[in-house]
Image (cartoon, rainbow, N blue to C red):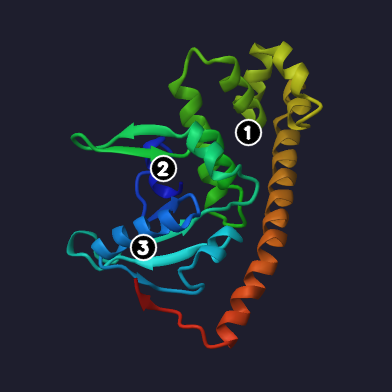
Amino acid sequence: MGGQACVFYGGAEFSRDTDVTTLASNENLAHLKSALRELHARRIAIPPFQLDYLTRGHAIHFRSYHPEAMKMRIDVMSVMRGVDQFDQLWERRVRMAGAGDERYDVLSLPDLIRAKKTQSDKDWPMIRRLIEADYVGHPEPTHEQLRFWMMESRTPGMLVELVREHQQLADALMDLRKALIHAEAGDESAIESELEREQKAEREADRLYWRPLRSELEELRKSGCASEEQV
């Protein structure tokens, strides 16, 4: 659901960690613990590796000490701000091919974009690159792809082109996204300003979402909860 998924979608060339989203259940946690033990993984930060922390939206952080994945960081989540529940994500997942017969289930691109709308500076350029790569890679887009690009693109010139070429769809979406109004006028400066406003609003929503979770982590630190342990 993170950098590795971005690599598959052509938005990045390198990722230092692996981000995983999983259905929060006791059975799944048992499977996940088994996989982490194969990786000789250790939990490297609070909170503890427990179901209730995952269901409340916390990320649980591990590091692999297996010789073939030495020091690879693994972050696990089950709930993300602004993103649908796991069963819906699983229904929309995309299966991509790796080396040989390897197959990987990754978030659909629209779900990945929603998951990337965080406070992190690095996520916003990534959103732009992912959508640009999708746009270039689909010269004969579906209606749903066109709608997705109009609602999520962060590239002014791309928005201007989309509105010019698909005016009827743009008209139907202008009430939902003000940037499309500026795109119809061809005003890239106004589009940039609106994109900055959108980003600021999402960053603030993410900050408010994480505030109680961060407070909970601080209480765990004060209580002396172990910040590292073997899985």
Q: Is residue 16 visible?
A: no
Q: Amino acid at mark 1?
A: Glu
Where residue 131 sits in the image (x, y, percent)?
Answer: 53, 32
Instruction: Kindly indicate the quadrant of the structure image that contains residue 106.
Output: top left
Where residue 32 sits in the image (x, y, percent)?
Answer: 36, 57
Residue 97: mark: none
Asked whether the beta carbons under mark 1 and mark 2 sit within 8 Å of each other, the answer is no
Q: Residues within 10 Å of mark 2 (few under 14, many from 20)?
A: many
Q: Earlier in the sequence, mark 1 or mark 3?
A: 3
Residue named by callout 3 = 73
Q: Residues within 10 Å of mark 1 (few under 14, many from 20)?
A: some
Mark 1–mark 3 Cα distance, whole angstroms, equals 29 Å
Q: Earlier in the sequence, mark 2 or mark 3?
A: 2
Where residue 164 sits in the image (x, y, percent)?
Answer: 68, 14
Mark 2–mark 3 Cα distance, whole angstroms, equals 15 Å
Q: How many marks?
A: 3
Q: Residue at x 59, y 44 (%)?
A: 85
Residue 6 in the image: above or below residue 72:
above
Residue 152: mark: 1
Q: Amino acid at mark 3?
A: Arg
Mark 1–mark 2 Cα distance, whole angstroms, equals 18 Å
Q: Amino acid at mark 2?
A: Ala
Q: Nearer the viewer, mark 1 or mark 3?
A: 3
Residue 139 in the image: above or below residue 157:
above
Q: Residues within 10 Å of mark 3 (few under 14, many from 20)?
A: some
Residue named by callout 2 = 5
